Amino acid sequence: MKSIWDKFKIKNIELQNRIVRSATNEHLGTKNGIITDAYIYVYKNLAKQGIGLIITSHMAVSKNQRADLTHICINEKENYNKLLELTKEVHKYGQKIICQISCGGRRASKIFGDKALSPSGNDNAKIMTKKDIDTCIDSYVSAIKVAKETGFDGVQIHLAHGYLLSEFLNPFYNKRTDEYGCSIDNRYRIIHQILSKVNDIILDPNFLITVKIDSTLKNDNIDFIKDQIEICKLLEKDGISAIEVSGEDFRKYKQNKPYYLDNALRIKDVVSIPIILVGGFRDEKQMNDALLSGIDLISCCRAFIADNNFIEKLKNKETSRCISCNKCFEIYKTLYKRCIFDEQINRGLYANFNND
Ligand SMILES: Cc1cc2nc3c(=O)[nH]c(=O)nc-3n(C[C@H](O)[C@H](O)[C@H](O)COP(=O)(O)O)c2cc1C
């Protein structure tokens, strides 16, 4: 009988249980994208809980393509020693940590205007030239190398939620007519080119290259999952170690139940690499049921925001107090608080840290 408390192995990396902390942007970078002590403190506290796999907040591969000012940039030299410190702190507790890497795409245009890049130039962002695409590929390659050198157990390439690489995959945003647009192979091309350049790392049994994908779109009047199933086959062929299944529309679901389960199972049917499912999990029974239906790992974000002892709660058969109100998206950025329920676990906790 499968349980979230089972150990699980991906390549040579053994996870102490099947629970994943999904990537969560804590907005704890400085205004220049540099890691703060508060950020490291958050991960140390997550590691203490005993989570099988911790995925960091998304980190930008390029300083000028960040989605917001506090978005940490992995390729900034000043972050190198801080990344080493981060992985060392997490490993002290025997936990595994992978780093999510992203590029803001059209979302970066909110702060960088037309310096932001996107496949077809939506929302003020500039249409990417072939040279921009090559530079972007190099930034991803560099980020993967930095993650490996600084002690991460792997990376997660962010292919979801409207950031740059998901824009390439999404036919609503990608209107290109060159070799990067139209067909599935073309929309996938930039990802294939990144992966081809890190082939030696892909073959390393001690380092995971994973992805997070959308299985639905916000304006889903096409059968996007059909395309994504084909994309997942290509990802597996290119050596990806695991796929986390999400959806662009995750904020609209108010029910605390795994709303992408059916899509994730459709993907599971066509690939043999582990499938991580995220979205809506709040208690142990839901999680074990999803494992029994075929999912390999269960990923949670908001439950870890609402409950800083979520693992303990699961062990005690308690349900997270998260009600999916989505207020955390705003209060994370603006107030010294993380959750509407949160009177104590607020940024007062980080008062000794300078976040400027
Ligand atoms: C405050 C906040 C920040 C998030 N930051 C990220 C992120 O950096 N990268 C990412 O892929 N998803 C991010 N997400 C989405 C979550 O990882 C997850 O996919 C989503 O919240 C659904 O899972 P849940 O129901 O367990 O919260 C964020 C979600 C929240 C609420």
Image (spheres, rainbow, N blue to C red):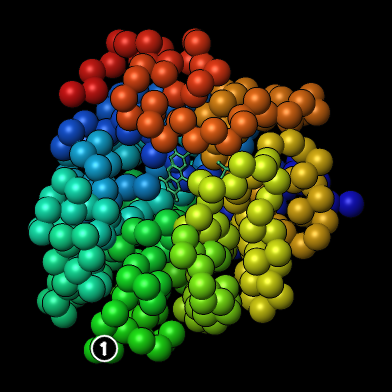
Number of labels in the image equals 1
Residue 74: x and y in percent read: 27, 48
Query: Front-most of 39 and 94?
Result: 39
Residue 43: x and y in percent read: 45, 31
Residue at position x 26%, y 60% in the image: 105
Query: Front-most of 340 and 28?
Result: 340
Q: Farthest residue toward the right?
A: 1
Q: Is residue 42 above or below residue 54?
A: above
Residue at position x 45%, y 31% in the image: 328
Q: Quadrant of residue 83?
A: top left
Q: Quadrant of residue 48?
A: top right
Residue on which disc 1 sits: 177
Residue 302: x and y in percent read: 55, 35
Q: Is residue 308 above or below residue 119?
A: above
Task: Give the quadrant of the C terminus.
Answer: top left
Residue 132 visible, this orientation: yes
Query: Front-most of 277 and 47?
Result: 277
Residue 95: x and y in percent read: 56, 38
Residue at position x 10%, y 59% in the image: 114
* Badge 1 density bin: few <14, some 14–19, many ≥20, Cα 10 Å: few
Q: Cβ of disc 1 within 8 Å of ligand 1?
A: no
Does residue 295 appear left or right of residue 165 in this picture?
right
Q: Element type at marker 1?
A: loop
Residue 168 visible, this orientation: no
Residue type at tag 1: Thr
Does residue 289 appear left or right of residue 136 in this picture?
right
Residue at position x 77%, y 44% in the image: 286
